[in-house]
């Protein structure tokens, strides 16, 4: 999960549901000030999503002076438009990673994801954050014989790098599945409630947050780096760019990724919801998971992913997603609809590291 400069909740007419996300609708707005001073810090973090705010808090608690800037409001981009699964199970990723990077490389990916789950859980426990966090099993499932083999291969791949994944034939989904990879002890949460609490902890530790402060450029300035913004410059020894596709790209990483858009409906269901978090292995992919709410549980059904710019009739995609939901669940009201755009790396591995050999003090995040 990470912030992105293009996220949409399209107000398409004749579609049911509020054109907003569950997370934005059920958490308070923020009101941090815009940058209003000359500022110099040890580390400037550009982007107020889960990557940016987590990095900022950890650095601030380690003794660095830090600030976070966001072009709009914090936790309002992709992090607020996700389905909010905290899981190491990403379709058939491990079979693919082993082919490209070997078991060692795939193992590093798995360990990093498992560690992230436990880090989030530890922060929630330490700070007493009420964000509807709960442990849950994650499933990648197949509904036809052709894809059953892929499920079996993914189970073997995950097992070979130490993940405690296993094969099941049946799930709690209300429709038949041929097979599924299951990984227990994953998690789900309310990302906005979690991160707004982290932001309070961060500012309480002396960190600074400036909203409506858009980064416009990055340049070396002697031993420091200057980030120019629409509110004035910020100088820092180090810069972390956590804006999904980076605003600063000296090595032309844009050529090694492409953009995709996907859609989500938040619906009421007239019977008990499935226990777990699910993603199909077949295309078009479908994501399914429930979330508790004050007025009853909401089922989040996602899918209809497409390469950005290749589809103009987004209303048809929402209708298609609604048709899928109605075919497989006894749907009541549709409460929410939203979409988000993300960048996908060509090898499915996150791009995280120094911006270039000449810019080792500028760190970029790009997660697939």
Image (cartoon, helix red, strand yellow):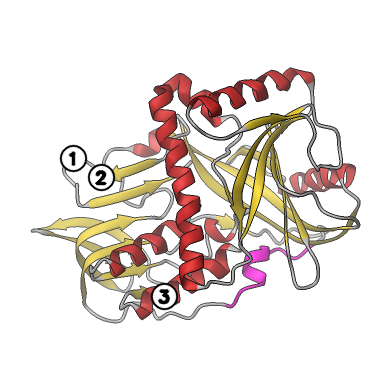
Point out which mark residue 357 bears.
Answer: 1
Looking at the image, residue 73 sits to the left or right of residue 10; the answer is: left
Magenta stretch holds residue 4:
no
Splitting the image into 4 quarters, where does residue 257 fall? top left
Q: Is residue 210 visible?
A: no
- Residue nearest the viewer, comparing 352 with 277: 277
Estimate the spatial distance between the alpha carbons at disc 2 and disc 3, rounded to whole Å.
27 Å
Splitting the image into 4 quarters, where does residue 193 fall? bottom right
- Residue nearest the viewer, comparing 100 with 113: 113
The image shows residue 59 at horizontal and vertical percentages of: 29, 64
Q: What stretch is highlighted in magenta?
A: 17-28
Estimate the spatial distance between the alpha carbons at disc 1 and disc 2, rounded to whole Å.
7 Å
Return the residue found at the far left: 222
The image shows residue 323 at horizontal and vertical percentages of: 85, 44
* Label 3 Cα neighbours within 10 Å, binned few <14 / some 14-19 / many ≥20: some
Point out which mark residue 354 bears.
Answer: 2
Q: Which of marks 1 and 3 is nearer the N terminus?
A: 3
Q: Magenta residues: mostly which secondary structure?
A: loop
Which residue is at 37% across, 48% downward?
A: 365
Q: How many marks?
A: 3
Q: Nearer the viewer, mark 1 or mark 3?
A: 3
Looking at the image, residue 133 sits to the left or right of residue 304; the answer is: left
Point out which mark residue 201 bears.
Answer: 3
């Amino acid at each position: 999960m990470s912030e992105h400069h293009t996220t949409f909740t399209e107000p398409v007419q004749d579609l049911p549901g509020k054109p907003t996300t569950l997370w934005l609708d059920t958490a308070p707005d923020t009101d941090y000030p815009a940058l209003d001073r000359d500022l110099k810090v040890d580390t400037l973090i550009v982007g107020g999503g889960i990557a940016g705010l987590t990095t900022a808090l950890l650095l601030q608690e380690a003794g660095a002076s830090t600030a976070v800037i966001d072009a709009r409001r914090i936790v309002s981009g992709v992090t607020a438009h996700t389905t909010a699964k905290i899981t190491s199970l990403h379709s058939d990723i491990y079979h693919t990673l082993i082919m490209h990077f070997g078991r060692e490389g795939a193992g590093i990916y798995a360990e990093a994801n498992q560690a992230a789950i436990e880090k989030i859980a530890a922060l929630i426990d330490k700070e007493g954050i009420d964000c509807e966090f709960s442990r849950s099993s994650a499933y990648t499932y197949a509904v036809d014989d052709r894809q059953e083999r892929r499920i079996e291969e993914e189970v073997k791949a995950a097992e070979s790098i130490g993940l405690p994944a296993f094969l099941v034939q049946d799930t709690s989904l209300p429709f038949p599945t041929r097979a599924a990879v299951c990984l227990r002890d994953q998690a789900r949460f309310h990302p906005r409630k979690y991160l707004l609490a982290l932001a309070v902890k961060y500012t309480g530790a002396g960190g600074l947050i400036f909203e409506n402060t858009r980064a416009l450029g990055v340049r070396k300035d002697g031993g420091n780096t200057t980030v120019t913004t629409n509110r004035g410059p910020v100088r820092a020894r180090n810069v972390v760019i956590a804006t999904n596709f980076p605003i600063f790209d000296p090595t032309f990483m844009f050529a090694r990724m492409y953009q995709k858009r996907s859609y989500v409906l938040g619906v009421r269901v007239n019977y008990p919801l499935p226990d777990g978090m699910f993603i199909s292995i077949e295309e078009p992919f479908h994501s399914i998971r429930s979330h508790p709410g004050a007025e009853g549980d909401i089922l989040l059904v996602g899918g209809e992913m497409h390469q950005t710019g290749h589809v103009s009739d987004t209303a048809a995609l929402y209708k298609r997603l609604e048709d899928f939901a109605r075919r497989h669940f006894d749907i009541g009201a549709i409460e929410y609809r939203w979409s988000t755009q993300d960048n996908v790396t060509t090898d499915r591995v996150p791009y995280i590291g120094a911006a270039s050999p000449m810019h080792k003090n500028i760190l970029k995040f790009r997660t697939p």
